[in-house]
Amino acid sequence: MKISAAILASLLAAPAFAADWAPEVNLENIAAMQVAVPSLPSKAGPRDGLNYSAAEEMLIKEFGITGITVDIPESEVIRQHQAYNNAVCFDLAFRQALNNLLEDYTSPTSALSNTLKSMGTAGTPTKSELKKARQKLLDSMNRPDARIALVSPFRLYQPQNGESIEANWVFHLRLGDKPFWAIVNRTGQKDAYNYGAN
């Protein structure tokens, strides 16, 4: 059987689809490749669904806080539930932390005490002054430049007084340029408290 030169040439030639193949893999081509870098996550508010849903729901329904930036990933809540000895669950701890931030003025650096000072209140506040200060604090928390986060080990926002993440649920609140920490003991044997940076 004889094969004509034209048929032989067409069989030996590169297939028609070879022109669309990827370029040769070598160091030069690899170095020239551009790989898209994932962007940083955008700020997530309570209504964005990017955080632990119980925390978002609590902020909205119980405290009326919808504008704050939230950094409470569900994966971190689950990790801390599994990794540490918790008599107090996250939901209860978060509620206690928020209530403490809005009610405790006894610590001189607490969020409410700081708000009372900014209003010019000295000494023990009246019920009326407390009500106004709580509303002002809520208004400050209800802004996009405010941020609340669940603190995890080896991450930003570590508590200034060195409280252990293993022994406490630790929440970081930033109001403008002022940081605060709310601490809730995981055993439930100590009262929740909060303080600000000195």
Image (cartoon, grey):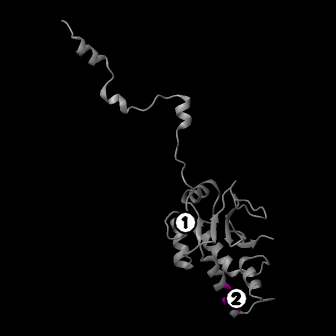
Kindly identify the amino acid type of the residue bearing the numbered disc 1: Ala
Kindly identify the amino acid type of the residue bearing the numbered disc 2: Leu
> How far across and down, in percent of the image, does residue 193 sit?
72, 73
**Is residue 33 located in the magenta-colored stretch of the structure?**
no
Q: Is residue 47 above or below residue 34?
A: below
Residue in the foreground of this view, choosing between 187 and 116 = 116
Q: CA distance from mark 2 to mark 1?
A: 30 Å
Q: Is residue 70 left or right of residue 188?
A: left
Quadrant of the rendered image containing residue 183: bottom right
Mark 2 surroundings: few (<14), some (14-19) or many (≥20) residues within 10 A? many
> How far across and down, in percent of the image, does residue 196 sit?
75, 72
Q: Secondary structure at mark 1?
A: loop
Q: Secondary structure at mark 2?
A: helix
Determine the residue positioned at 53% across, 34% down.
30
Is residue 187 at all visible to an observer of this figure?
A: no
> How far across and down, in percent of the image, does residue 95 sit?
60, 73
Q: Is residue 108 left or right of residue 140?
A: right
The numbered mark, 2 or 1, whose residue comes first in the sequence reads 1
User: What quarter of the picture does the N terminus occupy?
Assistant: top left
Q: Which residue is mark 1?
A: 44
Q: Which residue is mark 2?
A: 130
> How far across and down, in percent of the image, does residue 141 sit?
63, 76
Quadrant of the rendered image containing residue 186: bottom right
User: What quarter of the picture does the C terminus occupy?
Assistant: bottom right
Magenta highlight range: 129-134
Residue in the foreground of this view, choosing between 102 and 197 = 197
